[in-house]
Image (cartoon, helix red, strand yellow):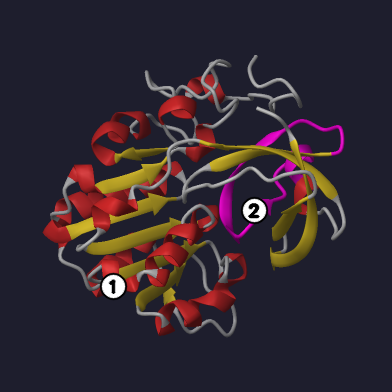
Amino acid sequence: MKQLRYRVVERRQETTDTATLTLAPTNGGIGAWTPGQFTLIRAGDGAEAPLAISGGGGDRIRHTVRDAGAVTRAIATAPIGTTLELRGPYGRGWDLARAHGRDLVILGGGMGLAPLRPVITEALAHRDRYRRVVVLVGARTPADLLYSQEYGAWRSAGAQVLVTVDRAQRGWRGAVGVITGQLPRASFTPAETVACVCGPELMMRFAAQALSRLGVPDKAIQVSLERHMECAIGRCGHGSPGSALVCREGPVADWERAAPLLSVAGPVAPAQQGSPPVPAGEPCR
């Protein structure tokens, strides 16, 4: 797929190491995308990184990027005016149509809230399509919370928003504890619920299991395996935890299918250990 040039037109620092970039095309955009999809993006002559789309409108697109290495650092710290190169969109996103007429429960842990932000935006823009919309947000500390300035607007638009952190800091008056600890406070009918879950593998496993125990059908629980994304077309072999090619068939998958992939100990499947980023211009290795 052709690389397209985008310019950083807005930059918002979310946390000390994470920023949301608003990008505008300079020579044609990537076209329509759906919540849960991602792009391959690079800065300068560096390697590409697969990044979930965290929002956008019209021909503009947003990416929330954490400085986690040389490639993502170059993107996350790009100042306004910087030109980046994108390819995409790639992947299978969240199936929101399944939630029409039902309760929609969204659980985002840490950076996992980024690919869920378009789900929240879409659901609240079409609030009449859903019964109840519940958003559960978790982070390590209050300083690590993404989009905290948007929670009030989400509530005003009709969502129940519950926020918790692992460790409180001075002045924090909210909940402390794991994100699943907020489920008893959430208003939804399990048998009539579709859930979207994204975050660290351990968090997704515990969240999906907790939802299943409450009575949410496994087929109605969707998780994102985006941390396994690599080449986006399933040829490099690095996006394959277990037997599934996440690049071709994901990153979003039903819990019924994803459960075996997330039952392996450790944050990343063995094939992922130490995997280098995808070299620019080389969609497969």
Residue 160 in which image quadrant: bottom left
Looking at the rendered image, the quarter that the C terminus falls into is top right
Residue sitting at 58 percent across and 16 percent down?
A: 236
Front-most of 48 and 86?
A: 86
Q: Mark 2 points at which residue?
A: 63
Single out the mark in the foreground, 2 or 1.
1
Residue sitting at 32 percent across and 34 percent down?
A: 258
Q: Residue 174: x, y in percent?
A: 45, 80
Q: Residue 84: x, y in percent?
A: 79, 44
Neighbourhood count class around disc 1 (C-alpha, 10 Å): few under 14, some 14–19, many 20 upward: few
Does residue 43 show up?
yes
Earlier residue among tags 2 and 1: 2
Question: Which residues make up the magenta segment?
Answer: 44-73
Q: Mark 1 points at which residue?
A: 128
> Distance between the Cα atoms at labels 2 and 1?
28 Å
Looking at the rendered image, the quarter that the N terminus falls into is top right
